[in-house]
Image: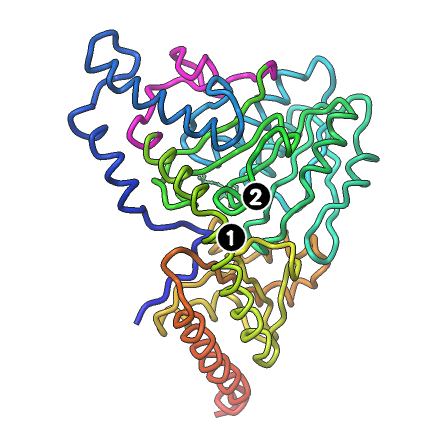
Amino acid sequence: MSVYLDHAATTPLRPEVLQAMQPYLTEHFGNPSSIHGIGRQARLGLDEAREAVAQALGAKPREIVFTGGGTEADNLAIKGAAWAASARGRELVVSSIEHKAVTQSVAVMERYGFRTTWLAVDRYGRVDPADVASAIGEHTTLVSVMYANNEVGSVQPVAEIGAICRQGGALFHVDAVQAAGFLPLDVDALGADLLSLSGHKLHGPKGVGALFVRQGTALLAQQSGGAQERQRRAGTENVAAAVGFAQALQLAQQERAHEGARLAALRDSLIAEMAALPGVSLTGHPTERLPNSASFVIDGVEGGDLVAALDLEGIAASTGSACTTGSAEPSHVLLAMGLEPEVAHGSLRLTLGRGNDEDDVRLTVEATRRVLERMRGAGERRPEVASV
Ligand code: PLP
């Protein structure tokens, strides 16, 4: 028995995606910058992939920069846009629950003298658009608020925030890495000037992503070298990965309504059954959340211990962000939502995906019940053992 409930960390490659990639790993191996036929074949694949990604976003192909993943897209957006607009101002407005790829990029900019207003979130992990309006000042050049949070799944009112940024004259970056495949991505409707995507969160390959850069948005490349990606990202393009990513995004968009509804129903029963276990409480917004995301805090247990115990039961879960696993610090997202550090230590994230069904929900709830009984029983006996 094995149940994979960690789709926010990564997803398996879809067979159709692998199939689309295969020719570009074998016979169409050319360098897309080469003039000869083999190069042109690779260029065609890359162009088609770019068109497909652009179409998914309601963007123009020239507005898509392929990157080496979501982290790189976030770095390019934050550092690239902040530097390019630095003559106008050095103030950034960023939500306090962003992924580390954003917060650490901002931290680098702060070392160069940029100032940040960190936006608070409510107890559900949501930003109040009114706070964005009051944070934007004369020297604010960039606002960054993620579409949906990777730890608690809460969805932000991005379109409202986008309109406020436009009014305030600030660029708006949206990290849509977790939202892609589940939520509408029309960049005009969202009011996004920059939007980050990642392949491996939507059954595409790892190490590939894209940054949408609205035409006319100045960006300082973060990598020096050749003129690839219209001089915004130097280096020979990973054609097979871009093709696979585009295919995965297209499939996810086509199936979004149907698969989203199926997952939301599974999520709701998972949340209801988990929250009925003693000491288990939901984190994040009860309804404004990703259709595949269920997250909890659990009284009296360490999230890491629980995840390890669930793994022995054949359930792959997570404490929160895969990127902070191994860190002793409680999640900055849960702390920003007002949870006490000792409560935040007991976090559990269960994220559903294409392969999951009702049986997986049942097995996970049963395993969690068993594991919690065991852990709590052991906890109660611990003083006796210690006194021996
Ligand atoms: N942004 C968010 C919200 C994420 O969840 C992740 C991955 O966990 C990233 C960015 C980074 O993406 P990648 O793993 O492709 O570098």
Looking at the rendering, the stretch of residues picked out in magenta corresponds to 216-242
Closest to the observer, 45 or 385: 45
Q: Is residue 26 above or below residue 201?
A: above
Residue at the left extreme?
27
Residue 311, position in %: x, y?
Answer: 38, 68
Q: At x 44% / y 63%, what residue is drawn?
A: 317
**Quadrant for the N terminus in the image:** bottom left
Callout 1 secondary element: loop
Q: Quadrant of residue 164?
A: top right
Q: Are marks 2 and 1 in contact (CB under 8 Å)?
A: yes
Q: At x 55% / y 37%, what residue is drawn?
A: 185
Of mark 2 and mark 1, the one earlier in the sequence is 2
Cα separation, mark 2 vs mark 1, equals 8 Å
* Label 2, ligand 1: CB separation under 8 Å: yes
Closest to the observer, 88 or 172: 172
Main secondary-structure element of the magenta-colored stretch: loop
| Residue type marked 1 | Ser
Asked whether 198 falls inside the magenta stretch, the response is no
Residue at the right extreme?
134
* Label 1, ligand 1: CB separation under 8 Å: yes
Q: At x 72% / y 36%, what residue is drawn?
A: 161
Q: At x 68% / y 56%, what residue is drawn?
A: 335
Residue 283, position in %: x, y?
Answer: 63, 62
What is the number of callouts on the image?
2
Which residue is disc 1 drawn over? 321
* Colour pattern of the rendering: rainbow
Callout 2 secondary element: loop
> Which mark identifies residue 99?
2
Asked whether 219 falls inside the magenta stretch, the response is yes
